[in-house]
């Protein structure tokens, strides 16, 4: 086990050293070419912002879909019903048809054993 740990520590140290060298080289280049560096930095920051927003939007959408699958809002009671699992497509269709028939969500979900 110690061989693996030593190997990992060596790789981490080598990566840190390589990153330090590249950062130092980037600083030197930026001092020699300030206009190009400013253009590249502003473009890179803008790209990072766009990428960050897309990632954030994707995460928020995925979390919203998870919540949508596990909760059903009952307007008549003004509350959410928490489901044990996501209903299948057939179950979802049966829920909607029973709801249109006049039953409330609590009775429907209890009969279908989703609560």
Image (cartoon, grey):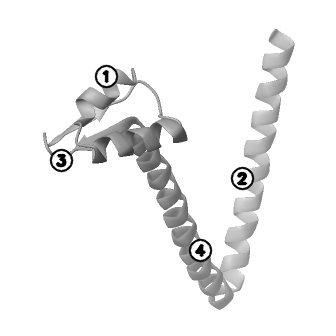
The residue pinned by badge 1 equals 110
Q: Residues within 10 Å of mark 3 (few under 14, many from 20)?
A: few
The residue pinned by badge 2 equals 20
Q: Earlier in the sequence, mark 1 or mark 2?
A: 2
In the displayed structure, does residue 74 sit left or right of residue 91?
left
Q: CA distance from mark 1 to mark 2?
A: 62 Å
**Mark 3 touches mark 1? (CB < 8 Å):** no
Q: CA distance from mark 2 to mark 3?
A: 59 Å
Classify mark 4: helix, strand or loop: helix
Q: CA distance from mark 3 to mark 1?
A: 17 Å
Q: Earlier in the sequence, mark 4 or mark 2?
A: 2
Please, which residue is most extreme toward the left here? 77
The residue pinned by badge 3 equals 75
In the displayed structure, does residue 13 sit left or right of residue 109?
right
Q: Residue at x 84, y 17 (%)?
A: 4
Q: Quadrant of residue 14?
A: top right
Position of residue 33 measured from the top left corner of the image (x, y, whole percent): 70, 86
The residue pinned by badge 4 equals 47
Of circles 4 and 3, which is in front? 3
Q: Quadrant of residue 8?
A: top right
Of circles 1 and 4, which is in front? 1
**Mark 4 touches mark 2? (CB < 8 Å):** no
Q: Quadrant of the N terminus?
A: top right
Q: CA distance from mark 1 to mark 4?
A: 50 Å
Classify mark 3: helix, strand or loop: loop
Of circles 4 and 2, which is in front? 4
Q: Residue at x 13, y 39 (%)?
A: 77
Of circles 2 and 3, which is in front? 3
Position of residue 48 measured from the top left corner of the image (x, y, whole percent): 57, 68
On the question of residue 32 being in view, the answer is yes
């Amino acid at each position: 086990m110690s061989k693996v740990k030593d190997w990992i520590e060596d790789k981490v140290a080598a990566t840190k050293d390589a990153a330090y060298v590249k950062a130092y080289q980037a600083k030197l280049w930026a001092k020699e070419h300030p206009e190009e560096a400013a253009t590249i930095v502003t473009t890179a920051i803008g790209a990072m912002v766009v990428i960050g927003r897309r990632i954030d939007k994707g995460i928020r959408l995925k979390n919203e879909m998870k919540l949508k699958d596990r909760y059903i809002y009952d307007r008549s009671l003004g509350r959410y019903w928490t489901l044990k699992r996501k209903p299948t497509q057939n179950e979802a269709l049966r829920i909607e048809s029973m709801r249109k028939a006049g039953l409330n969500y609590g009775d429907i979900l209890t009969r279908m054993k989703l609560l």
